Image (cartoon, rainbow, N blue to C red):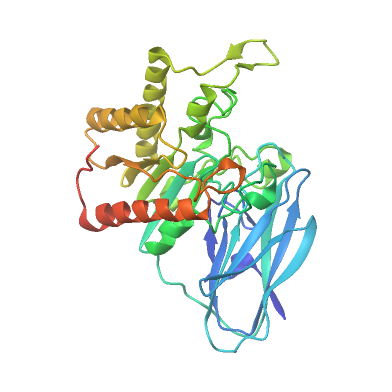
Amino acid sequence: MTTAPIRSLSAVRLLGRQPVSQGPVPCFYTASGIECLFTGSELALCLEAGFTLYEPWVSVELNGAWIARFPVQPGRSRVTLFRGMTPGVPKHVRVLKDVQAMHDDPDHFLLIEALAFEGGDFLPLPEPACRLEFVGNSITSGEGALGAVCEEDWIAPFFSAVNHYARMTADALHADWRIVSQSGWGLLSSWDNDPRRRVMDYYDTVCGLAAGPNNEALGAQQPYRFDSWKADAVILNLGTNDDGAMGNPPWTDPATGKTYAQRPTPEHLAELEQTAVDVLKKVRARNPDAWIVWAFGMLDEGRMGAVLRAAVARAAAECGDSRMCYLALPAATPDTMGARQHPGAACHRQAAQVLTERLRSILSTGEQRFPL
């Protein structure tokens, strides 16, 4: 077996946001990992991982089929992806981190260090037809996309990057894709009204919400280089936790004793609309050539649907921007609900169909407006 550092294999595609580094590849957000086309008979993955609360889970796809899923043990390990396959025949392999970046577990990390292989060559992968970035909360982290409907425990195994609307959409469009997401977080606060937990506060970093000195050393806090991977479309799926926060008790700052609560008052809904407008302008500034789609509603549009529609219309008008749109996604039903009262794989599939159709239209035809 030959073992080669992952960055020495130029034909291997790195997936997900990456810092400037020459060492092992850190997997921060959901669906980060690697992809390759290999002709040998055996291939193994060399990993290093750590955690205190939430172990990293990884999925393996071979020639488009989901063949393996496992938790990565602490320390260094080597995992066989396949063995004894026909030499000389190209095998398309994709390794995806299922679990999101764990803000509440600063010891959580996953590194891909090397590939070990028997003979064969790594062939160039086809260039992606487009690049898609997905920004969201637990839905975009794949929470509940795997597991029984009865599950309520908040644990790592119930996250999935495979049973996921982003993966399904990207594959349908032959796209490369990246995710920025955190469960429970929102535009103005988390589901429990904590205003420190806003996804877009970390948008300009590689993965700034991955806390702790170890993640900082791995490059999580580095500025993200938007020009190194230019998205053709940015899909926003934020707002569900803000809606939920309106019905939850206020959050109290332990340092100051001050409280914060989102409430469905006209004044606060106007503040949410303005925040969404600011988010759209921020995304546009970082992605000047991309379409921006606010795709929303997998847990019902609720109060936020009208707020977000208005925000998209305002931002488009104020910026003279014809490449912004709002897209309603199918809501989960009792038949399509997954674990932890989140959309299941069937709902993700329905959402992906709607989103794929819209993205295929706007990216292939250059459509200038989408009816709000």
The image quadrant where one finds the C terminus is top left
Please determine whether, in this image, residue 275 is positioned above or below residue 127.
above
Horizontal side of residue 143 vs 168, given as left or right: right
Horizontal side of residue 82 vs 74, given as left or right: left
User: How many numbered marks have been drawn onto this rendered protein structure?
Assistant: 0
Q: Is residue 24 at least partly visible in the picture? A: no
Task: Farthest residue to the front: give it.
Answer: 334
Location of residue 69 in the rendering, given as x and y in whole percent from the top left corner = 66, 63
Q: What residue is at 57 percent from the left and 15 percent from the top?
A: 260
Q: Is residue 41 at least partly visible in the picture? A: yes
Task: Farthest residue to the top: give it.
Answer: 257
Which of 110/242 is in front?
A: 242
Q: Using the rendered view, name the quadrant where residue 120 is placed.
A: bottom right
Location of residue 129 in the rendering, given as x and y in whole percent from the top left corner = 35, 63
Q: Using the rendered view, name the quadrant where residue 296 is placed.
A: top left
Location of residue 180 in the rendering, given as x and y in whole percent from the top left corner = 51, 44
Horizontal side of residue 8 vs 305, given as left or right: right
Which of 301/164 is in front?
A: 301
Q: What residue is at 64 percent from the left and 40 percent from the top?
A: 210
Please determine whether, in this image, residue 355 is positioned above or below residue 267.
below
Q: Using the rendered view, name the quadrant where residue 309 is placed.
A: top left
Q: What residue is at 59 percent from the left and 89 percent from the top?
A: 87
Q: What residue is at 51 percent from the left and 19 percent from the top?
A: 262
Horizontal side of residue 324 vs 94, given as left or right: left
Which of 161/207 is in front?
A: 161
Task: Farthest residue to the bottom: give it.
Answer: 87
The image quadrant where one finds the N terminus is bottom right
